[in-house]
Image (cartoon, rainbow, N blue to C red):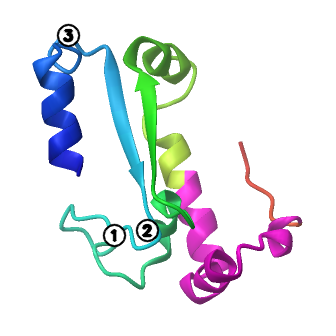
């Protein structure tokens, strides 16, 4: 599906002109970048997990504007640290039950 949608954007010249970005979410998402989080049990994978398959369509220009005020990688690093502190087993349980009430007391240092 990822390749198909990317090909469609390319054929419409959206990807080539960097107008849009696609961000995919799925209940079984696993990063495939070769780092240690490339295993199913790593909590960082839950950053892109969702009870339902979703595709976020982002306007590249708006993403770049939002990133200007944030040091490169800060949000990702903080999200990964927060997810690891919660733990993959807890995150898996929340995803399966579709209940995130136990996250109400989790604080993220922004």
Structural distance between the alpha carbons of marks 3 and 2: 29 Å
| For residue 66, side relative to residue 11 (left or right) | right
Structural distance between the alpha carbons of marks 3 and 1: 28 Å
Q: Quadrant of residue 26?
A: bottom left
| For residue 4, side relative to residue 29 (left or right) | left
Q: Nearer the viewer, residue 78 or 61?
A: 61
| For residue 87, side relative to residue 61 (left or right) | right
What residue is drawn where x is 85% and y is 71%? 101
Question: Is residue 89 part of the magenta span, yes or no?
Answer: yes
Q: Nearer the viewer, residue 13 or 87?
A: 13
Marking on residue 49 = none
What residue is drawn where x is 51% and y is 67%? 46
Circle 2 is placed at which residue position? 45
Question: Is residue 92 part of the magenta span, yes or no?
Answer: yes
Q: Earlier in the sequence, mark 3 or mark 2?
A: 3
Q: Position of residue 51 (x, y in %)?
A: 57, 67
What residue is drawn where x is 60% and y is 82%? 87
* Quadrant of the frame with the C terminus: top right
Which range is magenta? Answer: 78-104
Q: Position of residue 102 (x, y in %)?
A: 83, 75
Q: How many numbered callouts?
A: 3
Q: Using a 10 Å C-alpha cutoff, classify the residue at mark 1 as few (fewer than 14 neighbours), some (14 to 19) or many (20 or more).
A: many
Marking on residue 30 = 1
* Image position of 95 with respect to 25: above or below: below
- Provide the major secondary structure of the magenta segment: helix
Q: Earlier in the sequence, mark 3 or mark 1?
A: 3
| For residue 50, side relative to residue 39 (left or right) | right
Q: Nearer the viewer, residue 84 or 56?
A: 56
Circle 3 is placed at which residue position? 17
């Amino acid at each position: 599906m990822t390749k198909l949608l990317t090909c469609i954007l390319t054929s419409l010249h959206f990807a080539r002109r960097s107008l849009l970005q696609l961000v995919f979410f799925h209940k079984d998402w696993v990063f495939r970048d070769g780092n240690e989080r490339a295993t199913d049990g790593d909590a960082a994978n839950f950053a892109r997990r969702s009870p339902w398959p979703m595709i976020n369509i982002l306007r590249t220009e708006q993403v770049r504007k939002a990133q200007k005020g944030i040091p490169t990688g800060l949000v990702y690093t903080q999200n990964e640290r927060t997810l690891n502190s919660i733990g993959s087993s807890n995150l898996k349980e929340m995803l399966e039950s579709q209940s995130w009430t136990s996250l109400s007391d989790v604080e993220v240092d922004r």
